[in-house]
Amino acid sequence: MSTYQLVRAKDPQDLARRAAETIATTIDLALDQRDRAQIALSGGSTPAQAYSLLGHQHLPWDRVDVLLGDERWVAADDSSSNARMLRHTLFSDGLPGAQASFHPVPTVELASAEASAEAFSDLVTRVCAGSPPAFDLMLLGLGDDGHTASLFPGTEAPLVQDRWTTIGRGKGLDRITLTAPVLSAARQVVFLVSGEGKRQALRRLLDPMESPDR
């Protein structure tokens, strides 16, 4: 049975600090038990400040594999690319975090979103052991509509159980995303939620009477 702890931050700066500390602690604990640690990070504006703080942490970054939970099917230098955001925060030149091994989602260098999803699945399988692959940390966001990663309610993506990746279609862009089995297999899952617009989505997420489909 899964359990969760709800932690309230006093402001966005406190949220970023707590998130960075949680990720750093998880990496340390994982490396005490295994040669390498694998973490999957989310995109969006909320975690960017946390990643900048995390990048300054003096950790054994050369033993850490970093992947994304989802990515828009755009070029790596596109302003909406999650990989681009990570390169400007966690992996900024000169920061300790830049020593980590980053495995970005293959996107428009391939012929289609379907090809990208397949290539990302192969990548995840190579980097992360288990069936489904088990990350040490899965950092997730929460959309106003209740979606996480790119598993949008009312689409086929949240229902995919037989693959590690799929295509999430929402808000006008194809997205490559990890599927629910992989999100749930992580040793620790953290939702980072900020903003007045997320209150209703969080309330519904925690309501045991809420429809899982919704």
Image (cartoon, helix red, strand yellow):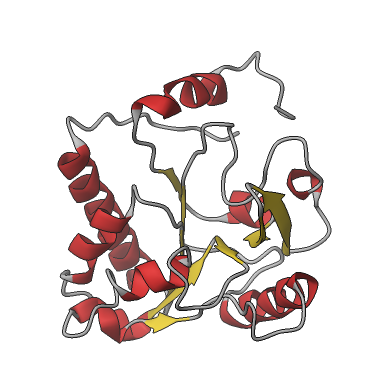
Q: Is residue 141 visible?
A: yes
Instruction: Please determine whether, in this image, residue 144 is positioned above or below residue 128.
Output: above
Where does the image place residue 50, in percent across and percent down from the top left?
25, 55
Q: Is residue 74 left or right of residue 62?
A: right
Q: Quadrant of residue 137?
A: bottom left
In the rendered view, would you say 173 is above or below 55? Answer: above
Regarding residue 33, the answer to whether it shows in the image is: no
Q: Nearer the viewer, residue 135 or 214?
A: 214
Which residue sits at x=47%, y=63%? 80
Residue 98 image offset from top left, x and y in percent = 27, 82
Q: Quadrant of residue 105?
A: bottom right
Residue 17 vertical placement versus 142 (above, below) = below
Q: Quadrant of the C terminus?
A: top right
Nearest the eye: 123 or 174? 174
Residue at 77% across, 35% down: 154
The x, y position of residue 39, in whole percent, is: 45, 66
The residue under the point 61% across, 49% down is: 184
Q: Is residue 174 left or right of residue 138?
A: right
The quarter holding residue 159 reads top right
Q: Is residue 187 above or below residue 205?
A: below
Quarter of the image for the N terminus: give it.
top right
Q: Is residue 40 left or right of residue 154?
A: left
140 and 130: which one is in front? 140
Q: Residue at x 79, y 71 (%)?
A: 114
